[in-house]
Image (spheres, rainbow, N blue to C red):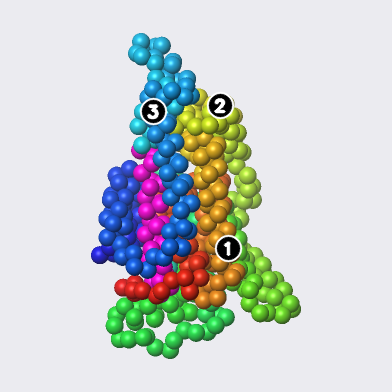
Amino acid sequence: MSRILALAVVALAPLPLGSTDQIWICIWCVLMAASLVTADLDGVAREDIWLLMPLLATLATVAAVVVVQEWRDSPLELGNPVWQAASKWLGSPPSSRVSTTVNGPWLAAGYPLLLAMVLVRAFVIATDAGSARRLLMLLAWVGCAYAIYGILAEFGDPDGLLSRRKEAYLGYATGTFVNRNTAAIFWGSTAILFLVPLLRFAHRRDHSEAPASPRFFDRATFYLSSPAALGTGFAICLTATAMTGSRAGLLLSICAFVLASTLYLAPLPLGNLRRWALAGGTAVAALLILQLVGGAVAGRIGAYGLIDEQRLGAYERSIAIIRDYPLLGVGWGNFETTFPAYRTAELGSLGVWDRAHSTPLELAVELGLPTASLIVLCCLWYVYLLLRSSLRRKRDRYIPIVGVSVAALGLVHSCIDFSLQIPGFGVFFAAIAGCGLAQSLPSELRKDRGKFE
């Protein structure tokens, strides 16, 4: 039941329009907390705890910063000037609170807590290699199901978005997400879950000829992990990614495919000629993918280019906020309330900038440069661990390869957009990252305990 709760959260998080409403974050937090409390920790070793320590230390630091931001009468005298102006006009006692809103940081803290719990829960599940393999397979087919829905919805009801009408991105597939860029990265990540096992089969050809037993679970695992099924799943997710029309989404997904292929082939004992032939073939395959399925994306690149001038303007304004509040920021979750005071005429009057369209920049705006730098360093450290394991691990090397490829795709895209700030994708991303991290440690450090059923 504990694992069923965790899997239900990961599988259902993309469904209610990406779970962007606060109520869904609360529901998923409660369910994931219940799953963690009842989790079986027999397979967790001391090395696993040390591996998770940077994450826990970063969470503790962020929690301390939020407390300081919410401190009404802080002795640090770093209060936001907006409270002095409010005190003057309202005739109320002045406040030295750092946050520009009273409850913003507390409300914003729920989603990162959810991400951390999902990552830790997936990590605990994936300490067993067999469980890790089955978890990734389940995530792959869950993502494929959303891709099938997105494709069918675009043909059957192109103006609909679940139970409501689309207000933006008409003519492009978004699935259950409001934003097509998030949908593209979600489906690109799912395609990686199919691609890497497919590469593994092409190299090892170790797929069994019959199910391990006549039980339904074993039969389903056998057929869903077959090369034909993996190739079909990859094609479906790639098609859905292209149908979003997202420039960065498709281009970065193709780069992630190349990264995954390179990491898998690099340690193999291949001759120089064969290695160069595979490298050239990978590049040609990437170009063919872009040419065959990226027609809408190529058209948008030709019409609008690769650079969004308004987004660059928003980045400049975000940097201006950081200059004014470098240490503790304006309060977590307060970007939308602060940005209008810095908005310039060049950005026009159309639309609301509720996000910086760059997660690292938004973190620096809301939490300050020191805390944002700590979060970035924590992410880079885990990416390094996944990358090292992808090149050194002997058994099940494809699991950390999946982890680092999806991590690179999600993190790089979040530098130019906000895909990781959407819970529907963020939860999925955290589960894959946690699974890869659990298998980044050598197998001999653990004992195989339990089965994922």
Residue 44: image quadrant is bottom left
Residues at marks 3 and 1, CA–CA distance in whole angstroms: 40 Å
Residues at marks 3 and 2, CA–CA distance in whole angstroms: 20 Å
Q: Is residue 150 visible?
A: no
Position of residue 1 relative to residue 224, above or below, is above
Residue indicated by mark 2: 324
State which region is magenta.
107-132
Of callouts 3 and 2, the N-terminal one: 3
Q: Secondary structure at mark 2?
A: helix
Q: Please name the amino acid that badge 1 sits on.
A: Leu
Q: Please name the amino acid that badge 3 sits on.
A: Trp
The disc at residue 71 is 3
Question: Residue at the spot x=48%, y=36% of the render?
Answer: 367
Question: Residue at the spot x=55%, y=82% of the render?
Answer: 204
Pinpoint residue 302: horizontal percent, then vertical percent: 64, 50
Left or right: where does residue 263 sit relative to residue 59? Answer: right
Q: Secondary structure at mark 3?
A: loop
